[in-house]
Image (tube, rainbow, N blue to C red):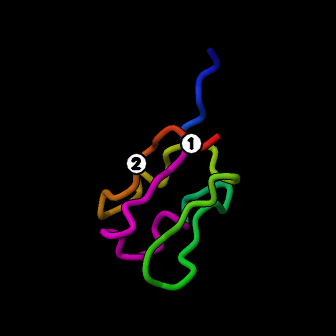
Amino acid sequence: MPRQQRKAKISTDQCVACGCCIKVCPRDAITVPRGIFAEVDENLCVGCGKCVKECPASVIRLEAGSL
């Protein structure tokens, strides 16, 4: 069975939209479209985990992506 790609997931109810994750994402997969919380484009996310390490609120985690 092939290993499933992990993707960044953001707890949007706890995100403060600081933008730290956007600055470190190498694929520009994260946006703050309405200025309220960040969102991840799973098609662009490569699961590198840089955003997880950078998030000051610790609301980003890596999880198995959608198929």
Classify 7 as above or below 18.
above
What amino acid is labelled 1 in the image? Gly
Q: Residue reaching furthest bottom? A: 34
What span is colored magenta in the figure? 7-22
Classify 66 as above or below 43.
above
Crowd rating for badge 2 (residues with CA inside 10 Å; few <14, some 14–19, many 20+): some
- Locate residue 40, reporting x and y percent: 56, 61
Q: Residue reaching furthest front? A: 67
- Locate residue 58, reporting x and y percent: 31, 57
Residue 13 colored in magenta in the image: yes
Q: Kindly indicate the quadrant of the structure image that contains residue 24.
A: bottom right
Q: Which residue is mark 1?
A: 65
Residue 61 colored in magenta in the image: no
What amino acid is labelled 2 in the image? Arg
**What is the tally of numbered marks visible in this picture?**
2
Q: Which residue is mark 2?
A: 61
Q: Residue at x 57, y 80 (%)?
A: 33
Q: Residue at x 48, y 85 (%)?
A: 35
Q: Kindly indicate the quadrant of the structure image that contains residue 10.
A: bottom left
* Quadrant location, the C terminus: top right
- Locate residue 7, reporting x and y percent: 54, 45
Q: CA distance from mark 1 to mark 2?
A: 11 Å
Q: Kindly indicate the quadrant of the structure image that contains residue 27.
A: bottom right
Q: Helix, strand, or loop for circle 1?
A: loop
Q: Residue at x 70, y 52 (%)?
A: 43
